[in-house]
Amino acid sequence: MEYQIDITKDIFKAKLSEKITFSDLDGFREMVKRMVESNSDSNIVDLADVEFIDSAGLGMLLLARDEISKVSSNLTLKAPQGQVLRMFNVARFDQMFDIVEY
Amino acid sequence: MPTDILGRKILIVDDDELHCQLIAIILTQDGYKNLHFARDGREALTMATGLKPDMIILDILMPNIDGLEVCRQLRAMRQFKNTPIIAHTIKHSPDDRAEIFDAGATDIFPKPVSEREVQKRVTMHLKYNRMMKGLKKYHQRLTHDLEIAHSMQDALLPELSQLEQIMESHGVDIDYQYESSQELGGDFWGIDTLDPDRLYIYIADFSGHGVAASLNTFRLHSLISNYNIPNAQNATPADYLEKLNRDLFNLLPVEQYATMLCGFIDVRQDTFTYAAAASTAPVKLNIVTGEVTTLNPVGFPLGMIAEATYENHTVSFKKDELLLFYSDVLTESRDQQGRMIGDDNFVKMCHQTNAHLCEDQSFLSRLLKSFDMLVVRPLLDDLTAVTVKRL
């Protein structure tokens, strides 16, 4: 997993790419830590360039949701595609996360 | 410096008494106190086997057996395979050095010696050796623990005698494959008799892998065993998932969850009623017509939200039909070109496998053979695949 962070006017954006799997746990935790520390009103995780997510990857998104809710901020998942979108549908992520298509 | 390092046995081998003394003085100054001496190659070899030194400092030009030969003979013995052997020699041209290293030496001290260099290098090699021994021991212990965990996990799976009994009593054919990955995984499945007409079947997979996933499979397995399914006649698969979800939600940290599918096979009504918690999509196949249907895997994963509800689905399940349950490694593995197999291709593989199936050939083993030809091993996760066929 690779990610780029962009913070503007109380919006924290993280653009993830490649794959989110078991081996990305440390990198992902680091990203979540920066998200929480930015104290932004809203947080967007852009998934448009993520081609694959495994079960551990979905777990990491839950972790992010949990950490963000602790600081009463918002988390939006943006533009899941392909396999990622299929995983979201199967696990009913639309009921647990704020998801926008683009 | 740590005292255990200073107490290590060092064997100093040199036919020149003065050189032996010189090295000994340098090492004693640094605090080393367990020093031993040999005067030539033959004595060195005899002493080494009894003494079992932690390090050998070896002159190369010696009468009888020279240092190179001593080095070769020591390395050929199992107990000295990893012992630091340091050549102490006047011959240290690039060619000489290559020959010394070829003989198995760990390092070279050129003569004349530099006091500080000898001290530093001896300490470095002893510390390095200690670290390697520690790592090796740790690795051995971990490997052993993982082997035990693997076999404990294998024990969660249904026994052959139980399966034979079910096949006999309910007129079904059950085939299954389980292959654990190098790491511990979170897969398991089970089947049980509900009543003379109905069977209860489930397949589950914990998120992630490794020790955490493995421990969680034991949690889930004991929850399932405690529900005492055969005595709860009116419960539906969705009821079981709801109960499991509540129990797991209270047990698990936020990022851990399980996917699962459970269902009732009714051989009198010719139906399969199931509920899913984000499992893989089971495949239903008619082995005569070749018709393939995928079942609905949508549902909240277990342990993610407190009060999840699940939906029951009922499909027909008649004679000559087969249900395939499998773990995600079958659809998420990659081929030689790095492309993921994917759900659609997997369904195609099932269809083709059936089309080319000879009589008396197992659908499952043929399917897994096609899978094996496609994917790159080793697999990154456990593989579980189960088929139940109506006879």
Image (tube, coloured by chain):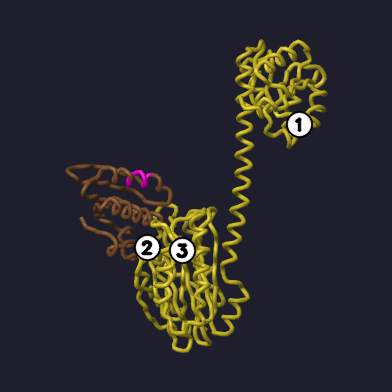
Chain colours: A brown, B yellow
Which residue is under mark 2?
B304
Which residue type does callout 1 highlight? Lys
**Magenta range:** A27-32
Q: Residue at x 40, y 48 (%)?
A: A25
Same-chain check, marks 3 and 2:
yes
A98 relative position to B227: left or right: left
Residue A28 lies in the magenta stretch: yes
Q: How many marks?
A: 3
Which residue type does callout 3 highlight? Asp
Q: Secondary structure at mark 1?
A: loop
Residue A93 visible to the viewer: yes
Q: Residue at x 22, y 42 (%)?
A: A7
Q: Which residue is more in the foreground, B207 or A86?
A: B207
Q: Nearer the viewer, mark 3 or mark 2?
A: 2
In the image, residue B169 sits, relative to residue B203, either above or below, namely: below
Dot 1 alpha-carbon crowd within 10 angstroms: few under 14, some 14 to 19, many 20 or more: some
Q: Which residue is more in the foreground, A62 or B72?
A: A62
Which residue is under mark 3?
B205
- Mark 3 → mark 2, Cα distance in angstroms: 14 Å
Name the chain letter of the residue that bears numbered label 2. Answer: B
Which residue is under mark 1?
B52
Which residue type does callout 2 highlight? Met
Residue farthest to the bottom? B268
Q: Which residue is more in the foreground, A63 or B69?
A: A63
Toward which corner of the image does residue B63 lie, by quadrant?
A: top right
Toward which corner of the image does residue B65 lie, by quadrant?
A: top right
Nearest to N terminus: mark 3 or mark 2: 3
B206 relative position to B143: left or right: left
Where residue B217 appears, as percent x and y from the top left, is 50, 63
